[in-house]
Amino acid sequence: MAKPASIQPGYCVAVHLLEETAPENCYIGMVEATDEYGILFNLVHWDDKLDMIGGYTESLFIPWMNINSMLVSTEVQPTRRFMADRARKWKAQIEAMYGKTSTAKKK
């Protein structure tokens, strides 16, 4: 999996987990910290009406060994496009791979 130096605090991520790691197969959030063990990120949602991150919820720690793949948006890429469009679509695609309906709702 990615080395901690390639994923920095403040980056937006959509994390695809190995099966049976957590209740969902994909989580979207903003990186808080990384270390040799895994990634800590704050789960967020995009508010279409405000056209910005609409709220932070709890933090989630995922060990590197439980991550299948990640979609990453760095500080030089547009957060809006990633959170409002790309991450939602990617999450829906991952859920479709597992035969689940999309939980990536527009707020």
Image (cartoon, helix red, strand yellow):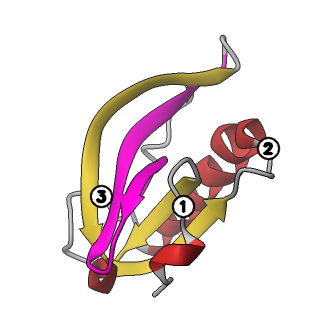
- The local secondary structure at tag 2 comes to loop
Which region of the structure is painted magenta? 26-48
Q: CA distance from mark 2 to mark 3?
A: 26 Å
What crowding class fits label 2: few (fewer than 14 Cα within 10 Å), some (14-19), or many (20 or more)?
few
In the displayed structure image, the side of residue 13 where residue 20 appears, left or right = left
Is 43 contained in the magenta span?
yes
Residue to which mark 3 is pinned: 24
Residue 83 seen by the camera: yes
The answer to which quarter of the image holds residue 61 is: bottom left
Q: CA distance from mark 3 to mark 1?
A: 23 Å
Q: x and y percent of residue 79 in the render? A: 71, 41
- Tell me the quarter of the image containing the N terminus: bottom left
Mark toward the start of the polypeptide (1 vs 2): 1
Residue 18 seen by the camera: no
Is 98 contained in the magenta span?
no
Q: Amino acid at mark 2?
A: Pro
In the displayed structure image, the side of residue 98 where residue 107 appears, left or right = right
> At 73% from the left edge and 36% from the top edge, which residue is drawn?
80
Q: Are marks 3 and 1 in contact (CB under 8 Å)?
A: no
Mark toward the start of the polypeptide (3 vs 1): 1
Q: Answer above or below: position of 99 versus 89.
A: below
Q: Answer above or below: position of 74 versus 16.
A: above
- The local secondary structure at tag 3 comes to loop
Q: Nearer the viewer, residue 12 or 25?
A: 12
Q: Count the labels in the image.
A: 3
- The local secondary structure at tag 1 comes to loop
Residue 78: image tag: 2
Residue to which mark 1 is pinned: 8
Magenta stretch, main secondary structure class: strand
> At 27% from the left edge and 44% from the top edge, which residue is drawn?
59
In the displayed structure image, the side of residue 100 where residue 107 appears, left or right = right
Q: x and y percent of residue 64 in the render? A: 33, 80
